[in-house]
Amino acid sequence: MKLNRIDLKDIHPSIINAAYYPFQTNEVNGPRKSYTPFFSISKAVKVR
Amino acid sequence: MKINGQLFSAQSDDMFYIEPGVEHTFYAYSTDPMVTLSVYVDFQPSAGASYERGNNQLVNYHLNTFELKRCVPTVYFRDGIQLPAKIKLPTHCSWMNGFYHVVDQIASEELGIENELRAAFESFFILYIRYFQNPHIMDDPRVQKVKQWMENELCTSVSIMNWAERLNISSSYLYELFRKATDCSPQHYWIQLKMDRAKKYLRETNMTITEIATTLGFSSIHYFARQFKKQCGETCSDYRKRMRKLY
């Protein structure tokens, strides 16, 4: 694994992708690995 | 959510951080379905693999074909900041707006959108780090005073003893207060400040390394160059070259 030790001041973030992923109920998405780090926020949705 | 074999419950407004190459699985339940908003980012695109905005080939489901060399480098912050795998976001936090803006605008073709997305992400990211590092811990006022003096007298070679005398406390007590507040010695903190300023000069001016060393109160360019290499992990010239490639 490549490691890179940097100062916070030196980050130069490049946004590669962003998305809103709706899940079907009971869906399992994975296992998977990503080539870039990512942040993911969970949001509850109303059950119809 | 399963990250690297560890199971996490996912409630609304939980934020997960997944490093490159780390195995993860999302689960959704019929009784408690979720959607996720994700932002894929490269913290330092000059350092390794680079991907175009909108690249949908970032995620590999066939783990046996996963190519480690296609991973962007995992970033470890020298300041000791460690991004947690999961954090509960406070409700109504305005600093999340940058994150949501990135999700909303990722497909935009507006002029300057790359910069806009980066700025939005940076504003989110910095405030997020401050949040989880607990911004409520306040420095001792004496430490704050010394920090202020350090900023103002960055170009001098004042000793710690001078500052302790100004505060009418012993230098060992100042050392202790400083350690408690910043987790490093006053000398180390001051060198860090000087190195931060040196980086700014390297990035934004054409000052020579000798001029920068002199401006920052270093009596010897060799000592300055050694300190820079030690603190920043690369030479002044390498840093300047690397940063200029980015802008």
Image (cartoon, coloured by chain):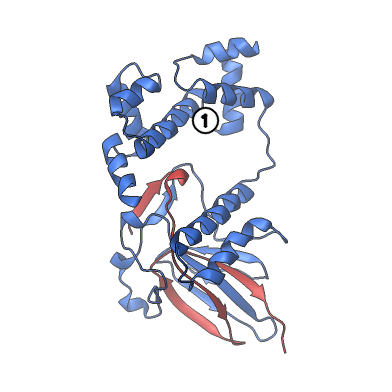
Chain colours: A red, B blue
Query: Which quarter of the figure has residue B142?
Result: top right
Figure check: B1 above or below B43: below
Q: Position of residue B168 (x, y in %)?
A: 65, 10
Residue B98 seen in the current view? yes
Q: Amino acid at mark 1?
A: Cys
Q: Nearer the viewer, residue B194 or B31?
A: B194
In the rendered image, residue B95, in percent from the top left (x then y), is placed at: 64, 56
Q: Find the residue positioned furthest to the front.
A: B111
Decide if residue B222 is on the left or right side of residue A38. left
Q: Position of residue B51 (x, y in %)?
A: 35, 67
Q: Which residue is mark 1?
A: B184
For residue A44, above or below residue B4: below
Q: Could you tell me if residue B87 is visible in this image?
A: no
Q: Provide residue A29's location: percent of width, then percent of height.
A: 51, 81
Residue under the image location 34 percent in, 51 percent down: B246
Q: Is residue B117 left or right of residue B210?
A: right
Image quarter for residue A22? bottom right
Which residue occupies 38% across, 54% down? B44
Residue nearest the observer in this picture, A12 or B191: A12
Q: Nearer the viewer, residue B136 or B185?
A: B136
- Left or right placement of residue A45 versus residue B175 in this view: right
Residue at the (60%, 87%) spot, across then down: A26
* Snapshot quadrant of residue B220: top left
Quadrant into which the N terminus of chain B falls: bottom right
- Between B24 and B208, the residue placed more toward the observer is B208
Q: Residue at x 49, y 62 (%)?
A: B117
Q: Dot 1: few (<14), some (14–19), or many (≥20) neighbours within 10 Å?
A: some
Mark 1: which secondary structure?
loop
The chain containing the residue under callout 1 comes to: B
